[in-house]
Amino acid sequence: MSKWIWYYGDFEVYHSLKLHARRDEFGHNFPPFWRLDDCWHNVRFRKEVELQTPEEITVSAHGVGNVEIDGRRHALDEPLLLTQGKHGIMVHVLNPDGLPCIYVKGKTVVSDETWLVNSYGREWVNAGSNALYLEKSVNPQEFGFSYEEIVPVQKNNVDGGILYDFGRETFAKLYVEIQDGEMDIFYGETKEEALDGRNSYLRAHIFPQSGICSRQELEKAPGRVSQPGQGNLETAYGDLKCGQEIPARAFRYLYVVSAPEQTYCLRAYHEYLPLKRRGSFRCSDEQINKIWDTAAYTFHLNSREFFLDGIKRDRWVWSGDAYQSYLVNRYLFFDADICKRTILALRGKEPVEKHINTIMDYSFYWLMSIYDYYEMTGDTEFVRRIYPKMVSLMDFCLSRLDADGFAAQVGDDWVFVDWAEMDKEGAVCAEQMLLARSLEAMAKCSQVIGQSCDDYDKAFVQLREKINRFFWSEEKGAFIDSFASGKENVTRHANIFALLFGYADAAQQEKIIKNVLQNDAVLQIRTPYFKFYELEAMCLMGNQEKVTQRIQDYWGSMLEAGATTFWEEYTPMLPWDGQLAMYGDKYGKSLCHAWGASPIYLLGRYYMGVRPTQPGYKAFEVMPNAGGLDWFQGTVPVGEGSVFVHMQPEVLEVCADVGGGVLLWKGERFPIKKNEVIRLPR
């Protein structure tokens, strides 16, 4: 089967470049503050073929160039006859403004990953491709979304303008036709933001254009759905060629001023990636059901070309945010392609000159994510192809260790960990935990592709010993943030990692639970980002009923505060106006942030209890835990199949449409056979 092919990884790099150029706020653009790479613009593709019979092929490309067959050049897009026997095919493509890619159509000679590609002076590698771009008519330089017209649920006249309420947060393009005068549109995740024109993050100014159609014509325009590869709304608008299209942005409210309503027509089209929801969850607690649904909606809004942080403010790809998204994805969409796209986009090109996103911990999360992806998919080929970039990034990280052998800030490195007050002087314990976990991931990935893991294993063992020696405080009964300052400050973060990663022995675990997790005097976690890890650690420690209460209290409180998607940060005791501000901006907080979707992961992983025990879910286990709920039922993807878990008040039922599973229940193991229901007393 023919497909569009390109230099491996360049599709992701190219679309990452385009995506990161789109952030706008307060009427101006805001590019990222890290290096953004571009695709190679001048590349060659080659293939050796041997034909049993003559065959005609056609080579198409995005860019300029030619086709060489056995050393003789030909034009692109011309039928070319290959005689019986061996032939060498070379395609040269230069695309100065976009992604060089080719599409070869023949009976047996087709463009696929077996073609080799290079960019003059670099080694030949197997080409890259994507299942979204199998048809010649679908352009890989455009990332296609689906569109659905949405309408406001309410509109009100406010101070001479009209406030439109779409009922919940969305991400949508606007199409506006105005007959006379000019108009301003102010966007808001909240009513307050939309009505505060001076401080609203997003706004648009609209004025009449030539060739304007009538309001009646615009209102009759059919709302159709675009296909992958179509980056505009031409099919959604029908044949209309008038009005102005405003790129997709986040909002719940739109406030329109400066134009009488009868002079304009405004239509909104929700822009989304058509991902199939494979996971599900329902339980006896209606609030948790609503939390799961809201988390799923939040997560879908942020699942686009790549996993984004949030849909209003940054719309950037952050490695720490993405790491959690990979895990949530397992229990909702189980879409491997968006994981690969995000991983490749984040890593970019060689050489490594800074940490990913300039953040030390985000480099470690990227390294950790490769083995997690392999565990999910069993995709050895991806590990093989990405492994050299793992090595170069790890070499960069190890080259910056301090005299004690710890990862510490160098220059303007950002030591993030979380939005929390902690002692970050010198080497920070949480960073060493993540580095150790990264070394483990390196060793495992080395084994996957048959490389020696001895150096990474040795470095891991040495680092583990030093973490305990330098950061464990017997007096505090916990890991301290930093030893450099002498403060011996204790926060939850490093101690949570110690529990999650298994870096605390049994005695240390007991002390951490008592002195940190159950100690209200230790600074509380305020972000959904780190509550993800805190609640997972509590699940591992057998505190699931408390986790249920935490989910109800934290995410439930957001819903009670009016959230229709989950927020970047939430402090329940703050007044409403204080909830919206962040980063020095009155409405700077993201109210639709992917890291708020962690209940999906927690409920799938620790309540339904499903996890892989072999890569790609060739074997998996199910260890349900009600967590204080009267009942729950749900579906979890397991590779190509699914497992259904129904915890009833008196009976547990488990069934899978694939084999290889084991149910762990009350100390016993029960093989899960394909399409056979296991029923056991609760």
Image (cartoon, helix red, strand yellow):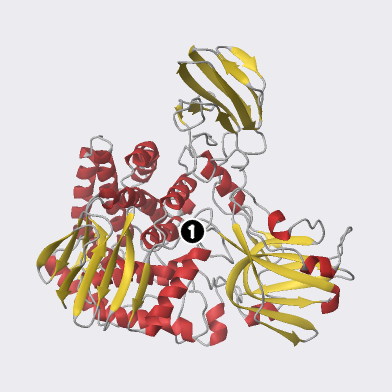
What residue sits 17% from the left and 71% below the top? 679
What residue type is disc 1 on? Leu
Question: 680 left or right of 396?
Answer: left
| Quadrant housing residue 611 | bottom left
> Which residue in the protein does label 1 denote?
275
Left or right of 208: which side holds 487?
A: left
Mark 1: give few (<14), some (14-19) or many (20+) Cα within 10 Å.
some
Q: The C terminus appears in which quarter of the rendering? A: bottom left
**Count of numbered circles in the view:** 1
Residue 11, percent from left and from top: 54, 42
Camera sees residue 405:
no
Q: Position of residue 309 (x, y in %)?
A: 50, 62
Where in the figure is residue 27, as x and y percent of width and height?
A: 72, 64
Quadrant of residue 138 within the rendered picture = top right
* Residue 179 visible to the viewer: yes
Q: Given the current orientation, which residue lies at the most extreme left position?
A: 668
Q: Position of residue 110 (x, y in %)?
A: 51, 29
The residue lying at 42 percent from left, 83 percent from top is 556
Between residues 607 and 450, which one lies in front from this camera angle?
607
Residue shown at 59% from the left, 58% from the top:
146
Comparing 160 with 429, the one in front is: 160
Q: Is residue 301 left or right of residue 626?
A: right
Task: Reply above or below: 238 against 387.
Answer: below
Front residue of 404 and 570: 570
User: Residue 97 is drawn in which quadrant?
Assistant: top right
Up/down of 265 relative to 153, above or below: above
Describe the element under mark 1 as helix, strand or loop.
Answer: loop
